[in-house]
Image (cartoon, rainbow, N blue to C red):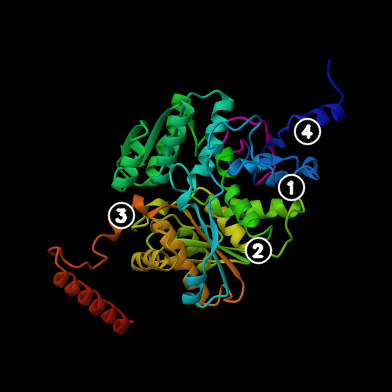
Amino acid sequence: MILPFESRLSLGRRLKMSYVAHLRCKECGKTYPLTPRTVCDVDFAPVEVDYHYDRMQGNVTRASIEAGPRSLWRYKDLLPIEGQPQAGLRSGFTPLFKAERLAAELGVKELYIKDDSANYPSFSYKDRVVAVAITKAKEFGFDTVGCASTGNLAHSVAAHAAAAGMKAFVMIPHDLEEGKIIGTLVFGPKMVKIQGNYDDVNRLCTQIADKYGWAIVNVNLRPYYTEGAKTHGFEIAEQLGWKLPQHTVVPVAGGTILPKIYKAYQEFIKLGIVEDNGPRMYAAQAAGCNPVVDAIEKGLELFKPQKPNTIAKSIAIGNPADGFYVQQVIKNSGGWGAAATDAEILDAIKLLARTEGVFTEPAGGTTLACAIKLIQSGKIPANESITVCITGNGLKTIEVLQGQFVTAPAIPAKLAAFDEVVAFYEEQAAAAVSAS
């Protein structure tokens, strides 16, 4: 027996029905069924998940979210899965805190750090997108997952695939940091090192997905994968007491996270969960790979691909898949962008650690360094609320800080020798003050 639509809708609500509608082309608007698909057949533009927002009204609320688990899955109704979560049950809901000491040093009134360096299990924001992608891969019946990665994504795919009992192939540029390589291999994936940069790896992964029929999370599952990034934005709003920050600074690699944080803000506004305060978005890139920021600063409609040359390898993507949509969001929100040199990135890593006790990788150093530039230039007013998004953990990239610190030599176990060390450090501190 087929129930009338109203009865099916009522039953669906009792069963926690998915609000996912279809895939929609981001340019021409053509819709497609919910299948593994990346682009539109008409104009080859990317497709994105669309939802039944009308059905969410009155059902997706602050209360319904707060009743959910303390993980990214508390926002399940706003994610593109149709059953129950099958990965990332302990991922997300990472700390957001008011950075009082850092704010004082920068001369700003209200500064927050959203810290995905503490995300579980792989210590980067990628655990959000991978949790959704692995769940979707299992819904579609895949038994093998893979990715093109600059490090953090490979780490996350390997960890989540292991927990989900799936096979994993991770494809990476040949010169990634050793911490990310070992941290990935421990989970047992098949790792393939490819000569070239991320863009070379990504092109190959498109062919791999076609030939082998695997779920390559950031290729044929990309529309679903990217939706997981919204949870970073949902959490910012909830953890700020159901308010939006006026300014959000986000690192840009492939261009996934910045537009999705903005989409999260807009979905909450549409559902009446938060007030619209005109949130502005800001792109942060390394000077050695800044195609999007370069286009923003020059007023170009389209960015020009670049060949990466920076210590910030996790965001070193010279031809970002969603770079155009980053530009659109920046323009529509009234934001801007900035780029940081490798030296500025290292200084920001040390500043964040010294003032707030957070050790971030170069992507986070880039974001903070760019936030500082945007504040100092007046692009971000010092008297308004600012959130800086930290997306990865510094323990994966300790190589970049070698030679950055001065330590006293080893001493015998004698108090007189210890006194000499104290004097040594006092001299170092005095020299630092003098230099500043």
In this rendering, the label closer to the viewer, 4 or 1? 1
The mark found on residue 90 in the picture is none
Q: Position of residue 309 (x, y in %)?
A: 33, 57
Q: Residue furthest bottom?
A: 434
Quarter of the C terminus within the rendering: bottom left
Q: Position of residue 383 (x, y in %)?
A: 60, 76
The magenta region covers 27-41
Which circle's residue, 4 or 1, is located before the other in the chain? 4
Q: Amino acid at mark 4?
A: Arg
Which circle's residue, 2 or 1, is located before the other in the chain? 1
Q: 305 above or below 102?
A: above
- Local secondary structure at mark 2: loop
Residue pointed to by mark 2:
279
In this rendering, the label closer to the viewer, 2 or 4? 4
Which circle's residue, 2 or 4, is located before the other in the chain? 4
Residue pointed to by mark 4:
13
